[in-house]
Amino acid sequence: MKTALITGITGQDGAYLAQLLLEKGYAVHGLVRRSSGMEINDARLRWLGIADAVHLVDGDVTDLSSLLRAVRTARPDEVYNLAAQSSVMTSWHQPLLTGGATALGCVGVLEAVRTERPEARICQPSSSEMFGRVRESPQTEATPFFPRSPYAAAKAYAHWMTVNYRESFGLHASSGILFNHESPLRGIEFVTRKVTDGIARIKLGLATELRLGNIDVARDWGHARDYVRAMWLMLQQEVPDDYVIATGRTVTVREMCGIAFGYAGLDMERHLVIDAALFRPAEAATLQGDASKARARLGWAPEVTLEAMIHEMVEADLRRLSGDAQGVPVRERPARAP
Ligand code: GDP
């Protein structure tokens, strides 16, 4: 039986990855940061019905001693560093915290593995946000980075540290350059989930409008379930490497909204309000990934279409807000949604 350690196991990707690994017969350990909201921390794991099947370890990626202890205790064959401050908008408000968790947290994981378990394989999820002001389209593993937010800069640092630990210390460390990936377990601070949650509220008479920022930006959106499968595939290779993981299909936020409003049978023009306060200081305008390398080497291809994913998310939010989906993460929207 293989053992995996997942930092960020309570997040969207952590929960889906834990589910995948459990199905494959792994013993799954997850690092959980203590907070006053402990009772809702494992909501995603509960929603997937796996909360009791994983071993949760108290710790934080910004605390090296806790990482060393987690690696020493779990003795993992595979380590997935999914812990991060992952919201781009929040990274503008909390740049230092973002650097600590998203950039230095990765180095903590690399150090802990190098010291305690150098034979373990490591997956670092990097981000398409690193391409920022894109130098070419579509983006491949060879496309230069031009990060345009504290989050993107932190991810670029973590990516290069992963490459450096691989080259300098011979660690089996791979970086997945993951384009946006969503699901019903996506945090409400991300645009797809904000849209599907907002539309469900309108449909149920709980709200009349949906306020968004820049809807002319375009993203290459896939389903998180497909992306965690790619992470696992990376670690099954003899040789560690870097892979772009993307669908290759790019649509604007406006088009994505159109899919969601259309599915709910609502008139987008009536309900969508553009709010200048939700625009970002700078950002990546259009992202489109070329996952040819992952297709060829990992045999990976996305299975869920954008339409199927958005429909699943609208359905899940309708059920959640109607109160018949026990355990789906219920998080009140912040006073001002990011
Ligand atoms: P990101 O690509 O990692 O920043 O993921 P997000 O889901 O947060 O944002 C995707 C795109 O949607 C970005 O270009 C945002 O500027 C745009 N967007 C437009 N309105 C909103 C909004 O109200 N919330 C968020 N999160 N994004 C928005």
Image (cartoon, rainbow, N blue to C red):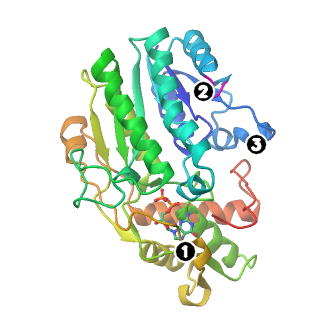
Label 1 – label 2 distance at C-alpha:
35 Å
Q: How many marks?
A: 3
Position in image of residue 49 (x %, y %): 64, 38
Label 3 – label 2 distance at C-alpha:
16 Å
User: What residue do we see at 39% from left, 63% from top?
Assistant: 284
Quickly name the residue at label 3: 40
The quadrant where residue 236 appears: top left
- Looking at the image, which is closer to me, 65 or 15? 65
Label 3 neighbourhood size at 10 Å, few (<14), some (14-19), many (20+)? some
Position in image of residue 8 (x %, y %): 58, 35
Ligand 1 has an atom within 8 Å of the beta carbon of the residue at disc 2? no
Callout 2 amino acid: Gly
Quickly name the residue at label 1: 213
The nearer-to-camera label among 3 and 1 is 1
Position in image of residue 143 (x %, y %): 23, 50
Quickly name the residue at label 2: 30
Q: Is residue 60 magenta?
A: yes
Ligand 1 has an atom within 8 Å of the beta carbon of the residue at disc 1? yes
Label 1 neighbourhood size at 10 Å, few (<14), some (14-19), many (20+)? some
Q: Callout 2: helix, strand or loop? A: strand
